[in-house]
Image (cartoon, rainbow, N blue to C red):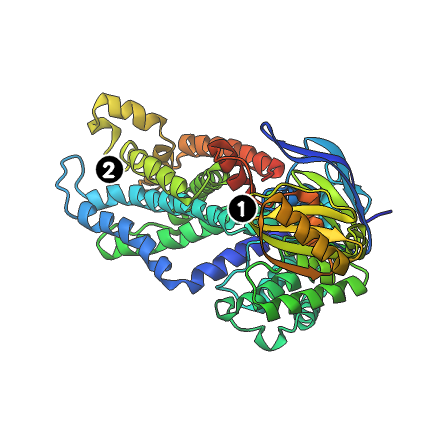
């Protein structure tokens, strides 16, 4: 039995298809759902946590169907949304105790102490949250989520708005939880973090999975080296033997090649002949950013402003 | 049941730690009591303060209930509601916790108003009469807070909730029997006042202070509260974002 299993999971907001026949199974790992804003990440999490009813398809968490066995599903998971929702007029301990009581955890006081200790908040446990930093608030939310020892943890953008040190710390905590056997499902749009800390990633674009695998596998699917060229003037995709076009992001164009050093002069020539001015070229190993670019295409949102879609997006944010 | 107590405890702790709000909610009803109750020259009764006090008590509960709806609005805007909905705790206990907190807070506030009324010259009642008064205020508080909390669940943001609050609180108060008996109202107003749920609570409290038992108004309140509560519980059980 997989911790999370979805089959053709679909959700429409009016005519807008936010999640489009998503089929996924996640078990005993840190799984990251990557995607640009509005690609359906949060909608997927809301359906898996029973906050939103799917339009079509089915999903289960720990073997319980999200539509028919909502309460059992909610018993086995914890959900930390992206807005930092902790009560600033309560202390750290009170905040965690509140969740322990809601979950009906036995020996609540001990469990609360334990969860605070795991998140390294013991020495500040009796201070009001008002005095906590952003990173500490996020750790407190994790402590609240851990207090009933869930089997599956859903984290929506767990490191958004945090500084580098706080991010690293949050990820170390998440890795530690995974080691204890918890399944962690995160959404993020920080590629480097997914690359470094997650076991498997799924890249989602317009509600569909565009690429799925371990970060290493996905990077290996591209060829060996990545060449990034800064160009000026018009650029038309061109054909050079042994070099493949990956994608374009602003004035940066990316290619991959089996042997980057040999490809560099060939590419410079070809670009020069096609009439664009090459400003700089660089050679590096592929990152998830390249995978993402290839899977999703241009990063800008191409549509013009549509008031109704904007409103739907706003509502989805809440 | 666990959930209800936890949700209620959270709101009470937060309320007691925000001292300004504890006092500020009392200014309006106290001002009505003093500046209208003591000052308005009326012919239909010798002790206008005793007449208006039940109206002001119910009004205190009304504004406590309506402003209490904003609590759920903030929980929703700040992301707490999503976390609560993902808990195995029955979703209806979010509603019941709010109702008990808002009504409890309202009862504390009405007690202070009652003390002020006594200090400035209202007639002291028997313990049984006070017991009945509190029972009626509790019923009315449950009715208003269930309604306000459920409305907040459906409105988009705090501005629209504030607009809803202003839109209904004053008209409800002025078209009730709070300020004058039906006999001195123009007939159109008397008709509206007879349909206003606020009037039933006020009439019930007024009957109690006059020494009677208001079986009719209490029955109406019971039925109304029961019906609204049942609908709101159903809405909360089914809620999705």
When the figure is inspected, residue A24 is found, relative to residue A229, above or below; the finding is: above
Mark linked to residue B179: 2
Seen as rendered, the residue at the extreme bottom is A123
Position of A292 with respect to B181 (left or right) is right
* Residue B232: % across, % down: 54, 36
Q: Residues within 10 Å of mark 1 (few under 14, many from 20)?
A: few
Residue topped by disc 1: A233
Element under label 2? loop
* Residue A113: % across, % down: 67, 71
Which quadrant is the C terminus of chain A positioned in? top right
Q: Residue shown at 60%/68% (left/top)?
A: A164
Eye-nearest disc, 1 or 2: 1
When the figure is inspected, residue B46 is found, relative to residue A183, above or below; the finding is: above
Q: What chain does badge 1 belong to?
A: A
Nearest the viewer among B29 and A194 is: A194
* Residue B110: % across, % down: 36, 51
């Amino acid at each position: 039995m997989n911790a999370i299993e979805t089959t053709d999971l679909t959700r429409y907001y009016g005519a807008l298809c936010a999640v489009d026949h998503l089929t996924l199974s996640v078990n005993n790992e840190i799984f990251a759902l990557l995607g640009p804003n509005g690609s359906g990440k949060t909608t997927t999490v809301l359906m898996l946590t029973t906050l939103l009813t799917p339009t079509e398809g089915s999903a289960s968490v720990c073997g319980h169907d999200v539509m028919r066995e909502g309460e059992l599903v909610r018993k086995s998971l914890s959900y930390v949304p992206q807005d930092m929702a902790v009560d600033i007029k309560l202390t750290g301990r009170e905040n965690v105790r509140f969740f322990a009581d809601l979950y009906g955890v036995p020996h609540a006081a001990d469990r609360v102490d334990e969860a605070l200790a795991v998140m390294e908040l013991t020495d500040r446990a009796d201070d009001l949250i008002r005095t906590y930093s952003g990173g500490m608030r996020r750790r407190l939310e994790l402590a609240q989520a851990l207090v009933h020892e869930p089997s599956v943890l859903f984290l929506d953008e767990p490191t958004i708005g945090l500084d580098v040190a706080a991010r690293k710390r949050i990820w170390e905590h998440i890795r530690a939880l995974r080691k204890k056997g918890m399944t962690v499902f995160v959404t993020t749009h920080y590629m480097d973090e997914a690359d470094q800390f997650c076991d498997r990633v799924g890249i989602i674009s317009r509600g569909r999975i565009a690429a799925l695998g371990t970060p290493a596998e996905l990077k290996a699917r591209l060829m060996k080296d990545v060449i990034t060229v800064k160009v000026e003037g018009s650029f038309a995709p061109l054909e050079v033997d042994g070099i493949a076009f990956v994608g374009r992001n602003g004035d940066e164009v990316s290619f991959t090649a089996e042997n980057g050093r040999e490809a560099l002069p060939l590419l410079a020539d070809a670009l020069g002949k096609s009439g664009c001015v090459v400003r700089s070229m660089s050679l590096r190993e592929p990152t998830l950013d390249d995978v993402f670019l290839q899977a999703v295409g241009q990063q800008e949102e191409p549509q013009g402003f549509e008031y109704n879609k904007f409103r739907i997006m706003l509502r989805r944010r809440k | 049941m666990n959930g209800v107590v936890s949700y209620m405890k959270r709101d009470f702790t937060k309320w007691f730690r925000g001292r300004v709000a504890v006092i500020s909610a009392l200014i309006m009803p106290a001002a009505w009591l003093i500046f209208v109750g003591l000052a308005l020259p009326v012919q239909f009764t010798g002790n206008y303060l005793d007449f208006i006090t039940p109206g002001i008590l119910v009004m205190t509960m009304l504004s406590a209930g309506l402003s209490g709806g904003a609590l759920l609005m903030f929980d929703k805007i700040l992301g707490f509601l999503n976390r609560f909905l993902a808990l195995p705790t029955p979703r209806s206990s979010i509603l019941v916790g709010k109702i008990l907190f808002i009504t409890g807070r309202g009862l504390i506030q009405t007690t202070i108003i009652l003390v002020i009324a006594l200090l400035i010259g209202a007639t002291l009642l028997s313990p049984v009469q006070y017991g009945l008064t509190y029972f009626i205020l509790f019923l009315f508080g449950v009715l208003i807070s269930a309604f306000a909390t459920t409305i907040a669940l459906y409105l988009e943001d705090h501005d629209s909730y504030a607009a809803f609050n202003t839109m209904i609180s004053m008209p409800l108060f002025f078209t009730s029997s709070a300020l004058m008996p039906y006999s001195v109202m123009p007939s159109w107003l008397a008709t509206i006042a007879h349909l206003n749920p606020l009037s039933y609570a006020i009439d019930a409290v007024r009957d109690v202070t006059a020494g009677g038992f208001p079986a009719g108004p209490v029955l109406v309140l019971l039925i109304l509260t029961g019906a609204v509560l049942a609908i709101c519980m159903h809405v909360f059980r089914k809620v999705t974002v």
